[in-house]
């Protein structure tokens, strides 16, 4: 039963871990810790929402817990001019997912956490603030900063976007 | 590529984890199970045992304290109520007794005679002092000379002497008296006047 669950979700959850944690060794630790949590708390799953979503949340929380000490978030009050726009990402069309993942992994843990949670997972700023223990304003400012940094990385690697 | 596409690409990103992860998880689960079941039960028993013991101690101490506290409160209240009741009773009794004694003295000519005819060198065995109950129930000795002065008009406590009426009466008696007072003491003068009144009545 546990092996079946592992086989079914391990690849997806490893992908989640790698989005939050760049270092493979740390990602492996989080994988192990995450699945232990899943198996221990299986009885707590009430069938509200998808089972995959429930497992995914466990892995997101475990990843964040693992990197919490490294995630230092500060409220950025200045206007971020280099915010990435949707059309800036056209260059990424031709890139493989792993390459995009590498770019995202160049973000600092704080930026990466907010970017992943907001853009990829679809969490609201309120939810992010609760999970990370920050204010909604900080979450918003971190997202803007992370987009700006992403734009700089893309510009640097692929030349000026647009 | 929009942010939505960006999301879709990365959201569904999956890659197989290293093969050594599952054996580690399986080992941890096996060890965890043995330890967890044993430790969990043990901890559970310890927890419930400690909770029960703590509850019993708390209930026992609480009941002892409550009983002691309520006893001390009720005892104090009872004592206070009893004391105040006794005091009120004593005061009432003393007033009543005083009133009775004074009334009997004033209204009984025989008694009055005994009192006023008392002389220091007299052979008549009369009372030197009257003993009445004080406000606290204690015995108070008063001179018979002033006994008639102490009369309460309305049974109030402390008794209010009705001086003016008595003094007017004595003034009248003294003015009509042919016996010259031999003493400069006012009380003796009153006594002389009273003697005269008794003699007149006789």
Image: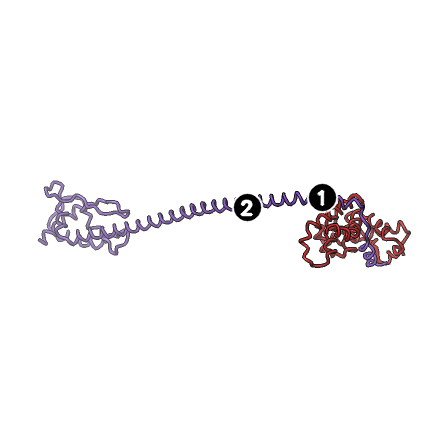
Q: Residue at x 10, y 54 (%)?
A: B201
> Where's the C terminus of chain A, which quadrant?
bottom right
x then y, percent, for residue B140: 23, 45
Distance between the alpha carbons at the discs numbered 1 and 2:
31 Å
Q: Is residue A10 left or right of residue A162?
A: left
Local crowd size for mark 2, using a 10 Å CA cut-off: few (<14), some (14–19), many (≥20): few
Tell me, by letter, which chain the rendering colours red. Answer: A
Residue A111 seen in the current view: no
Is residue B41 toward the left or the right of residue B54 in the image? right
- Which of discs 1 and 2 lies nearer the camera? The answer is 1
The quarter holding residue B39 reads: top right
Using residue B21 as the reference point, say whether residue B200 is left or right of it: left
Q: Which mark is residue B28?
A: 1
Disc 2 designates what residue? B51
Residue A120 at x, y percent in the picture: 79, 55
Could you tell me residue B8's position as x and y percent?
82, 57
Nearer to us in this view, B5 or B73 = B5
Q: Chain of mark 2?
A: B
Question: What residue sits 25% from the left and 51% below the top?
Answer: B93
Say which residue appears at 90% left-offset and 53% top-offset: A160
Query: Do marks 1 and 2 both belong to one polypeptide chain?
Result: yes
Foreground of the two, B92 or B183 = B92
Element type at mark 2: helix
**Residue shown at the point (26%, 45%) measured from the top left:** B138
In the figure, the shade used to draw chain B is purple
């Amino acid at each position: 039963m546990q092996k079946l669950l592992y086989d079914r979700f391990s690849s997806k959850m490893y992908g989640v871990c790698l989005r939050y944690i760049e270092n493979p060794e740390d990602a492996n630790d989080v994988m192990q810790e995450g699945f232990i949590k899943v198996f221990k708390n299986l009885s707590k799953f009430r069938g509200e929402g998808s089972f995959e979503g429930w497992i995914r949340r466990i892995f997101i929380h475990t990843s964040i817990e693992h990197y919490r000490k490294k995630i230092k978030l500060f409220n950025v009050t200045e206007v971020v001019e280099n915010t990435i726009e949707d059309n800036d990402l056209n260059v990424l069309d031709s890139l493989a997912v792993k390459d995009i993942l590498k770019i995202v992994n160049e973000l600092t843990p704080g930026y990466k956490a907010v970017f992943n949670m907001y853009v990829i997972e679809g969490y609201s700023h309120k939810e992010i603030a609760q999970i990370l223990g920050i204010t909604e304003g900080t979450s918003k400012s971190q997202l803007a900063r992370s987009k700006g940094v992403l734009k700089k990385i893309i510009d640097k690697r692929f030349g000026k976007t647009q | 590529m929009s942010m939505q596409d960006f999301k879709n690409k990365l959201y569904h990103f999956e890659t197989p984890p290293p093969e050594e992860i599952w054996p580690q998880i399986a080992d941890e689960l096996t060890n965890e199970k043995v330890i967890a079941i044993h430790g969990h039960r043990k901890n559970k028993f310890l927890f419930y045992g400690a909770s029960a013991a703590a509850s019993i101690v708390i209930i026992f101490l609480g009941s002892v304290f409550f009983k002691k506290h309520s006893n001390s409160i009720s005892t104090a209240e009872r004592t206070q109520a009893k004391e105040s009741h006794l005091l009120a009773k004593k005061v009432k009794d003393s007033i009543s007794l005083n009133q009775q004694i004074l009334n009997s003295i004033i209204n009984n000519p025989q008694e009055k005679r005994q009192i006023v005819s008392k002389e220091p060198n007299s052979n008549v065995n009369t009372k030197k002092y009257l003993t009445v109950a004080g406000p606290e129930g204690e015995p108070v000795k008063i001179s018979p000379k002033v006994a008639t002065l102490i009369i309460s008009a309305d049974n109030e406590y402390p008794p209010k002497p009705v001086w003016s009426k008595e003094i007017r009466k004595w003034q009248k008696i003294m003015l009509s008296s042919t016996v010259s007072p031999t003493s400069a003491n006012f009380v003796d003068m009153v006594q002389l006047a009273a003697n005269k009144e008794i003699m007149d009545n006789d």
